[in-house]
Image: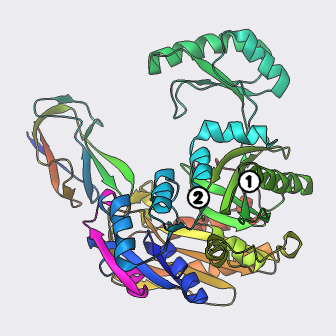
Amino acid sequence: MRKVLVANRGEIARRVFRACRHLGLATVAVYSEADVDAPHVREAGEAIMLGPPPPRETYLDIERILHAARRSGADAIHPGYGFLSENWRFAEAVARAGLTFIGPPVEAVRAMGDKTEARRLMAAAGVPTVPGTPGPIADVAEAEALGARAGYPVVLKAAGGGGGIGMVRVDKAGDLATAFASATRRAQSAFGNAAIYVERYLERPRHVEVQVFADTHGTVVHLHERECSIQRRHQKLIEESPAPNLPAATKRGLVDAAVAGARAIGYVNAGTMEFLVDASGGFYFLEMNTRIQVEHPVTEEVTGLDLVVEQLRVAAGERLSWRQEDIVQRGAAIEVRVYAEDPDKNFLPSPGTITRLEMPAGEGLRVESGVESGSVVSVHYDPLLFKLVARGASRDEALGRMRTALGATVVEGVRTTIPFLRKALEHPDVRRGALHTQMVDQGAFR
Amino acid sequence: MPEEIKAHITGVVFQIPTKKGDKVGAGDPVIVLESMKMEIPVEAPRAGVVREIKVQEGQTVQEGDTVAVLD
C-alpha cells in the first residue's frame, strides 16, 4: 500500500490524510464542484474532481471514484464514514478493481447492514438482543408468553411499519388483550397490514457502544466504551468515554459481548458494536457500524492510541500493534459535534458562508474541522462543521475544558448548535452523568 | 387575495406533493426541500387553492424565494 484515496470530504477526509502522512503514504482527494476550495482538497498530494455538487454524482458514485483511483494510481481506498462507507457493493467493487478497501471484509459489511440479519447473527453468537418475538404473533397468548418470559413493560409494534406509528406500550399482563386488539386495528389502518410483534420496552435507555478492532491474523480487541446517549432523532450530539456511572459488571459484559460478536462474524479493522443499556444495567445489541465512527477521537484521547493509523496498518495486512492488556482508559474525554443547524428553530439546517471562524485552543483540547473562514456550507452535504474534543484527568476536568472551549469558539455567517451544546453541558443531569437517549427529544435542554 | 409562499431555508426542491388547482389546508406541505440530508416541508400558511408552483424538482432555492402562489 503506497497511495490512499479518500472517498469522502470534510473533517474525516483531513483526519485520514493526517494518518497517511504519519505513515508516509501518498494521498488522493476526490471532490465535487461545491468543494473546489475545501481544505481537504488542498491538503492531499493530488485531487481529482468528480462532478457537480449532488452526492449521487460524486461522493456516492462508485464508478467515478474507482476511475479516480485508477487515474491517480491509488492502490487503496478509505471510505471515511457516511457516503459509501457501509455500502457492501462499494467494498466489493473496490476489491474487484484490485484495490485495498480500508475497512472490513465485504461479507461483514453486508451482514451488519441488514439489521434483522445482524441481530440474528449476534444472538447466535451469544450477544444479548432486545427480547422479543422472532416474527408476527398469531394471538394474544403469544404476547403473554413473551411478557412472562421477558418481563413488563412490553411494546406491541406493527410488523409492516415503523416510525413509532401504531406502537402500544403495555405495563401488565392484564392489559394485553385490549392492547392487542387496538394495536392490530391501528396497524391495519396505518399500514394495511394487521401483523404485530412484541418486544420488551426499554425505559429511558442509554446508548453505550464498544470500539472493536481486529486484524487479518485472528486477533480481536476492544478499546473500551463510549457513551453517546445525548442524541436527537438518532443523531449523536455529545459523546464521551468512559461512560459515566456504568456498573462494572455491565462494562465487562459489554466488552466481552462486543469482542465475541466481532469474532463470530470474522470481523477485520475498526468497528463499533452499539448497545442499549437499561436502568438495571441490562444491555442489548442495537447494531454494528462497520467503519470508523465520527466519535472515534474520544477513544483515542483516553487510550492514547491512533485508530486511523491502525486502520491503514491492518488494511496493509499487518498485525494489530496493541495487546488487549495494553489498552487502558486514562482520564476522560468528551466530544461535541458542531452542526450548521439552528437550535432555536428546531435544528433547521443553516447553510451559507462562514464569514468568521475562531477556534478554541488550550490544554487537553483537540479540534477536528472540515471548514475554515470563508468556507461555503453547502445544502448538499451533512451539516457537521467540526468537532471539539476535550480530555482531562477526570470527567469534571474534561467537561470544564469543553465549557471553556465552547465559550471561546466563534462562528459567524451560519447558525450552529453551539448554544444548545453549552446549555446541555450545564444541565445538572449531564454534570452528574445521568443520561438517557430521550433527554433531548423530551426537551431537557430547552 | 393571492399569497406568495416563500422558502424559509435554502435548499434543493426534493418533492412537489401539490399541483396547480389543488386545495390545501393550513400547514399542508406544498413543496418539500432537501437541505443537508434533511427533508423540510414548506407549508401553506393558510387554507386555499394552489394557483401556481414556481419551482421544479432538483432546483436550488434560496431562503426567501417564492416557491408557490396560493389563491
The residue that mark 1 highlights is: A262
- Describe the element under mark 1 as helix, strand or loop: helix
Q: Give percent across and percent down for residue A76.
A: 50, 72
Q: Chain of mark 1?
A: A
Furthest residue toward right: A249
The circle on residue A28 is: none
Counting other residues with Cα less than 10 Å from the Cα at mark 2, is it few (<14), some (14-19), or many (20 or more)?
Answer: some
Q: Is residue A44 magenta?
A: yes
Q: What secondary structure is found at the residue carrying circle 2? A: strand
Q: Amino acid at mark 2?
A: Lys
Tag 2 residue: A236
Query: Residue at the location (53% across, 12% down)?
Result: A185
Picture quadrant where residue B47 is located = top left
Residue type of the residue flagged with mark 1: Ala
User: Seen in the image, is A284 located left or right of residue B10?
Assistant: right
Observer-nearest residue: A133 or A368? A133
Q: Quadrant of the N terminus of chain A?
A: bottom right
Residue B67 visible in the displayed image: yes
Seen at 38% across and 81% down, the residue is A41
